[in-house]
Image: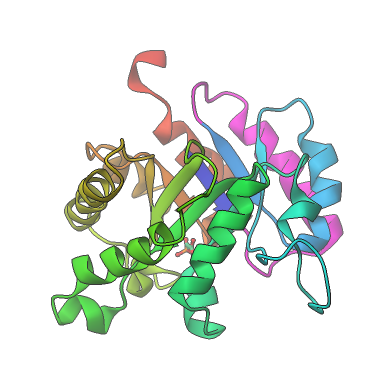
Amino acid sequence: MVAGNWKMNTTVAEGIALAGAVCAAAAPADGVDVAVLPPFTHLWAVHSVLQGTGVRLGAQDVYWKDAGAFTGEISPAMLAGWCDLVLVGHSERRHLFGERDDEVGKKFVASLAHGLEVILAVGETSDERDAGQTFAVVDRQLDAVFAQLEGAPGLDSWVIAYEPVWAIGTGRTATPEQAQEVVAHIKQHVRDRLLADSPRVLYGGSVTAANAASLFAEPDIDGALVGGVSLRAEEFGVIIAAAAPRDSA
Ligand code: PGA
């Protein structure tokens, strides 16, 4: 899976054009689950562009209530039925906007309840890594979500994105070995806690056309969540091609 998080970039017109270019760039890569996550203002228009292309549509965030006096928020009920995915727990939401682990859990559960596939982002800061807390941090972030799953609908459509905060937008990509180590830990943690198979786990943080293939060569890395480079369709297309199953080439 390769998902492009556009963050707060592009006008609506630019986003429509970018979505078209991504579809063209993604078309040759069979067997890769491709998604774009434009800003909320673009979603409806981009939804039309993606029709029939196989490229899926995602939102970058969501609130956990269905409706009500929550000025500025978007609910999962508003996205349900036409938007495929929603990203929750991105490090920019956690660190710039003070989102807590339990709030991420509420967003996760509410999105599943509306049939949206959820990409749950987790990851440590550089201080946490230096202090040897990487595994403890991702475990805490995952457990805060799992704590809210009781009575929630089945966990059949979700994805985890491991995104070390120090690698996001910094050009300082985790080495394939560093990423593999944490992704393997995450999968084991999910199996231990949920007594079920782990979903796909993506890596995110300064993924480029140049480093994608070496990340995807690791046994547990199932794709990428791409920020900056997802705004450049051709380069994004190279990342998608690098994710194509080897036997389909
Ligand atoms: P980046 O962002 O690729 O620009 O580092 C990744 C992300 O935030 O998902």
| Residue at the far front in the pictured view | 151
- The picture quadrant where one finds residue 115 is top right
Front in this rendered view, residue 45 or 94: 94
Examine the rendering and report whether any part of residue 197 can be seen.
yes
- The picture quadrant where one finds residue 197 is top left
Front in this rendered view, residue 98 or 43: 98
Instruction: Identify the residue at image location x=51%, y=51%.
Output: 119
Against 228, is 43 above or below? above
Instruction: Identify the residue at image location x=31%, y=46%.
Output: 194
Number of on-image labels: 0
Q: Residue 147: horizontal and vertical position, in percent?
A: 39, 62
Q: Residue 184: horizontal and vertical position, in percent?
A: 21, 47
The quarter in which the C terminus is drawn is: top left
Against 152, is 167 above or below? below
Instruction: Identify the residue at image location x=27%, y=43%.
Output: 214
> Which range is magenta?
5-32
Instruction: Identify the residue at image location x=53%, y=49%.
Output: 152
**Was residue 96 drawn as part of the magenta stretch in this picture?**
no
Q: Residue 235: horizontal and vertical position, in percent?
A: 53, 46
Using residue 210 as the reference point, say whether residue 20 is left or right of it.
right
